[in-house]
Amino acid sequence: MSITSSIFLIFLFFVFLIYFLIPKKFQWIFLLIASYIFYLFSGFGKILFLLFTTSITFFTGILLEKTDAELETILNNNVKPLSKEQRKKFKDSSKRKKRIILICALLLVLGILGVPKYYNFFAQNFNSLANVFSLDVDLSLLKYLLPLGISFYTFQSVGYIIDINRGKIKADRNFAKFALFLSFFPQIVQGPISRYDQLAHQLYEPHSFNYERVKFGLQLMLWGFFKKLVIADRLSIAVNSIFGNSFQYEGLSIFIGVLFFSFQMYCDFSGGIDIARGIAESMGISLVENFRRPFFSKSIDEYWRRWHISLGDWMRDYVFYPLALSKTFARLGKFSRKHLGNKIGKIIPIIIANLITFMAVGVWHGPYWKYVAFGTYYGLLISIGLLFKPFFQKIVRALKINTDCFSWRLTQISFVFTATTIGRYFVRADGLRHALQLLRQTFSIFNPWIFYDGTLLNLGLRVEDYYLLLISILFLILLEILKETGINIREKISHQNLVFRWSVYLIGIFAVLIFGIYGQEYDAVEFIYRGF
Amino acid sequence: MGTTKNFLRGTFFLIILFVIFSYVSEVFARKWDVQKYVDNFYEQPEDSIDVLFLGASGFGTGVSPLILWEEAGFTSFTRAIGAQQASMTYYYLLESLEYQHPDVVVLDAYRLIRHNKFEDLEVSYRRSYEPLKFSIIKLRSLFDITSDSDLDTFISFLFPFFRYHTRWPELERADFEFNNYDNDYSFLGQFPYFNANPVEMPEDLMAPTDEEVEIHDNELYYFEEMIRICREKDIKVFLLVMPRLSLAKYSEYNTVKKFADKHDLLFIDYNFPELMKVVDFNPATDMLDQSHINPCGAVKFSRHLAEVLKNNFSLPDKRNDPDYFQWHSNLEKLKEQISQNCN
């Protein structure tokens, strides 16, 4: 059930209605039921995957906490105080036990994600390799559909387990409540990837109907629908037309396709997240922000702190830091400082941790070499930035470039935008080879005549669609600029007079209804991130 | 702010939303040319129609209620919509019986042996469904015709705006004035398309055969239901096929004849060359396109049809009834156009 489908809107209407009508103590139970009904639409079998991950994560949490409690009991409740050695021995044994539990749980939880998501990728590459060495091995491929939102709820699970292991949070003792944390329907499809300490208590708390909050939530949903249905799905028509027959296009046509795809992807993903956050907000639940105007980033590093924030944060906390702060990396740092000098040597472990983290980001998106290349591309860009930062700073100083002005910031933003647009070649292409081919085609010819020879009108969009897109994207950029300057648009609107407020709402609603791409003629395009 | 105030505010907002939505829906609605025929039916006084023709374009182009009136004096109306499927004809019958109690219902037998899937004929369904006034029968037809479709299709029939919202670049002044069709239409369901496209008479037209065609369960069900309902209301049923020339097949005639015999119904198929000769049909001047006759041809067939109906059913002659004075002036209008366009 897509969250832009009519059946979902009907489902949502009844969820809102029942949620605020039933006694508050049952609200979380109802949310759990609603979430599982929503999930059921993706197929009964898929629920087993979700239940498996939920069970493993839930019991792992309890087991880890129990191990800690046992150690505490031994250390504190002994009539006869333990010697230092004995205390160390118990602590080591408990640590070992926790590590075994942790590793087993992570293997199971990540395995249930990894097998369906990555097995075919592994098997295909293994078979190709076996073929090169003329080995008579042929791993058969599996045929199935990936369970809905598995990448998102698995990462929530892993975060939960690691946080308990670190003693950051307490294990949930109520299985049903915990099941709700993993399955909360607005966010299970495409995130954001929430943390237990941020989300869980909100789901379990009772929430009264709050007119202002519901109004704000609905406004956010409306904005999400606008981005998704009016901009993203309209752009997708031209994007699919170009990439579906990419061999027919070259030069700027391909670049326009990728540029459109950049906006499509942003509006698609952030639109979906706004819908999810709007639904949650209406029910009094605040989901984390997943986008903070990424196109205004002045560095690649900053871009990844603004784009898919919850994934970036997750990777930082559970991949980058554990790697960068590990003993192995400390040894690596010592080694590199010794051989490459203090300045560069200090950066080397960070660069390697970054590369690994971004490759993980890439692989998280899907089991294809193009995503490995995508992750490596960003890892390399950030590494180059880190390595050459002093050099760039020297050039800036030598050329006496004023870095405290609009034009410099615009240059930086343009650079990041171009770099991320190139990164999208890997995302949109059918494979790594196709991505490289598209890059080649882009730079093969400079053909600005496509803007007036009718090429753009053969992509499935009418002139009126281009006008509409232009106005919509300018409007989007204007709102993003206002938000960037710290203006809360919903707050601003709420302080206006009723006629103005209602006019804004009605224009928004009818803009989506009239200009949205939906209905029989067009199927709303599946959310891009739903596939990850 | 109080809960009641918020509730009232929300309700008022929804009312405004609904009002604007209704207006926008009207603007975006497809303005069907058949709307004038449907409206013309609603304009008829209750219980004023003696013979009701129900079917597809063959009836709309071929049957002239005003010529029937001129020839035999009974009143009739042609409720015909291009490519109308038997299911919609069924609901047109039900809806018609809410307004009229005719003595005879003439069904387009060509639709008995034609079955099209919903997906292939969405336009035909919409053309039949959308112009109707809102009623329980219309709702029933909606549930029926979308029973095998998805929720989006159902919603788009219930609120056609969701089907036509993509029309925004092509909206015209007429869309905003809700009035882009002929308000003076008064030909009682007959299509007033006077073009003439010469057509050659197929050499093997209605070449005899013992073969039959299959009647789809769907069509069989609706035709039998229509017959049952008419009999319940003491209405006579008559099966008719208007000239289709190259589309006409003897095997189809065999099938309909068998069906008509089974149900003891009068059946006439005007595709037989002998009948065409009797009515003085000329394919060079009387055809609108390859399979539809034009009003010039309709005059000839309707004159013959008036005789058939008069001879087989007991129908009143209302030509001297002052309540039907308007029929004479409407007939004059039609005849004026005929004299201008037909030889």
Image: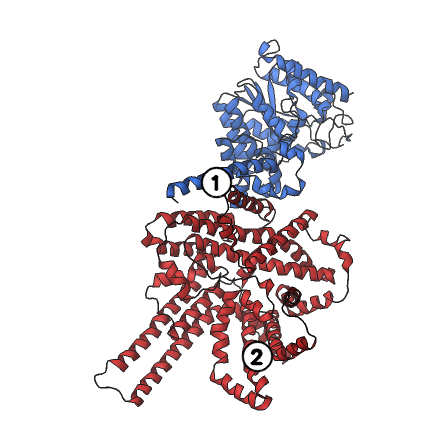
Chain colours: A red, B blue
Picture coordinates of residue A226, whole percent (x, y):
56, 51
* Tag 1 near tag 2, CB within 8 Å: no
Picture coordinates of residue A134, whole percent (x, y):
63, 80
Q: Quadrant of the N terminus of chain B?
A: top left
Task: Report which residue position mark 2 lands on.
Answer: A351
Q: Is residue A464 left or right of residue A15?
A: right
Q: Quadrant of the C terminus of chain B?
A: top right
Q: Is residue A69 left or right of residue B105?
A: left
Q: Is residue B237 above or below residue A65?
A: above
Q: Amino acid at mark 2?
A: Ile
Q: Is residue A208 left or right of residue B62?
A: left
Badge 1: how crowded within 10 Å, few (<14), some, or many (20+)? Answer: some
Residue positioned 59% across, 48% down in the render:
A516
**Along the line of sight, which residue is nearer the eye, B286 or A517?**
A517
Task: Report which residue position mark 1 lands on.
Answer: B13
Picture coordinates of residue A394, whole percent (x, y):
66, 79
Q: Is residue B71 left or right of residue A2?
A: right
